[in-house]
Image (spheres, coloured by chain):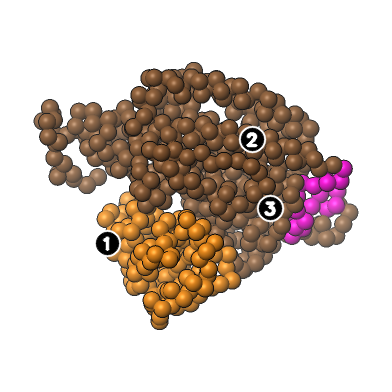
Chain colours: A orange, B brown
Amino acid sequence: MSISRDHIKEKLNTQFGDGIVSWNDASDILTLEVKPDLNLKVLTFLYDEPSLRFQFLTDLTGIHFPDKTGAEIGVIYHVHNLKENIRLRVKIFVPIQKPDVYTATGLFSGANWMERETFDFYGINFIGHPNLKRVLNVDEMDYHPLRKEYPLEDQTRIDKDDEMFGR
Amino acid sequence: MPEQANIVLPEGSLEKQTTRLNLGPTHPATHGVFQNILEMDGERIIKAESTVGYIHRAFEKLAERRPLYQITTLTDRLNYCSAPLNNMGWHMTCEKLLDVKTPKRVDYLRVIIMELSRISDHLICNSIVGVDTGAYTGFLYVMQYRELIYEIYEEVCGSRLTTNMGRIGGFERNFSNTAFQKIEQFLQEFPKVWKEFENLFMRNRIFIERTKGTGAISAERALNYSFTGPNLRAAGIDYDVRVHAPYSSYEDFDFIIPVGTTGDNYDRFMVRGEEVWQSLSIIRQAYEKVQSFKGQDAEIYHADAPEYYLPAKADVYTKMEALIYHFKIVMGETEIPVGEVYHSIEGANGELGFYLVSDGGRTPYRLHFRRPCFIYYQAYEEIVSNTMLSDAIITLSSLNLIAGEMDA
């Protein structure tokens, strides 16, 4: 492994300075949080910079923290430099009232459905996405089910009477 | 369905207009519930639009209210052709979060099971490619060895398709002698069968002409589409999680990663075929390693993780700690440490990843499955554009798209 975690940190810190909110070195994968409007710039920099070359998007997903006011909805990217075999996790957080995030589809074709899935479940608006519509749920659905305000049904409820299966 | 008014017929087309054709969701040739809305010029596909989601089961939401061990049953139903692989991947993710170290013997037993399920998955995929090119015999012939693999599962865990195999820390019980006998039988009989199966296809002119040069994707595009597994390796990139980030003691084994060059259906078929040989070799090595444990060591089948591994029933009746752990595990009252892990394994059709976030509660705060099929399938539209409909059918099966994995 020729890229060290310090090298990645140094490169990104010089390039983005205050744009980087925090680093987490203790996690299994080096993790950084950046300002939400910088996500595409950071990903592009990671992609193009000759000494980094994080050119493989492993995973893209969302998360919801209802208690983090102003930064409820998160988007998490896992990128991978296959040659040097090192992974990196990039996070951004946006307010739930205005969950606007720049799309990564221009950089990674594979982000297309991953972003559609994230939109489907968390309602994140990926600006510039070529075809942002639901992928797993029905088109008519008017909510985003993985948000925490939609709890699963209480399994101990007794008010529901089902003739076939009972309760 | 949006209007596709801008479709222009290619030059030299005999048609007056394009035809819109629904392939699926319940077409027998799609082997699962996929729908493709194709815009056709005669038999040539001009444009495809794929839709999924017909069997979405909200696993990620369900997982947010289940203790870790109850999520194993959800992973069964991802890629149901190789359920034990998913189970093992999930257990290893938990072990990474809980910092449980598994003994070597457990790792080797897991390797045997994981490679067996890789074989059973490739077996289906390759033989289905055969079926779609018109050769049904191979499919039926190799099925009896999938049956044998399922019998091995049955000996190990009691079930066949959705296995719920293993526990956090190891297996629920030691492998029985019958299980080892069946593994031995498999190692003895299967190579001959697989050889025969390959002979049927590898130099078969009809098969080669149907598959060579169809459904191809270049290495650059495959990488850009986040391809992993055999589909990426067929395009010539030797990325394999077993080598890049060894888990379950894969570093102790000697095997090669087969790669293709063109990323077409034939290369995918060949890569999977060769992977079966490699898996057989790994199973043989692992089997020998397992046999080399003697006496007390041969009785080890789980890690020492009392908070997560269900104690023996006899202990529950006689020891207080065991009773407490038993109760806490069964009732799902064990608190999971705070943390965030991403763990991936080389699933049968690519990097199967688990992204697990815990806030210290009894259930995961967030669990995301990186499902390789879901990620492949978006490339299908690009791969089949400007190809013949009959080639698109083979491409669909040779990408090894499993509906269960797409719709987590």
Q: Which range is magenta?
A: B295-316
Question: Quick one: label 2 or label 3, which is nearer the N terminus?
Answer: 3
Check disc 1 and report the residue beneath it: A128
> What distance separates the C-alpha of mark 3 from that of mark 1?
42 Å
Q: Tell me which chain the residue with mark 2 is part of.
A: B
Q: Which mark is residue B315?
A: none
**Viewer-side residue, B122 vs B265:** B265
Q: Residue at x 52, y 22 (%)?
A: B197
Residue A16 horizontal side relative to residue B341, left or right: left
Q: Is B89 inside the magenta-drawn segment? A: no
Residue B289 image point, x, y percent: 75, 41
Residue labelled with disc 3: B168
Asked where in the image residue A99 lies, by quadrant, the reply is: bottom left
Marks 2, 3: nearer the viewer: 2
A112 or A53: which is nearer to us? A53
Q: Is residue B297 magenta?
A: yes
Mark 1 or mark 2, whichever is nearer to me: 2
- Three-letter code, disc 3: Ile
Residue lying farthest to the top in this orientation: B137
Query: How packed is label 3: few (under 14 Cα within 10 Å), some, or many (20 or more)?
Result: many
Q: Position of residue A87 (x, y in %)?
A: 50, 61
Mark 3: secondary structure: loop
Please name the residue shown 73% across and 32% down the image: B179
Dot 2 corresponds to which residue? B281
Three-letter residue code for mark 2: Ser
Q: Decide: marks 1, 2 in contact (CB < 8 A)?
A: no
Q: Assign the N terminus of chain B to one quadrant of the image.
A: top left
The reply to whether the C-beta atoms of the residues labelled 2 and 3 are less than 8 Å apart is: no
Q: Nearer the viewer, residue B289 or B164?
A: B289
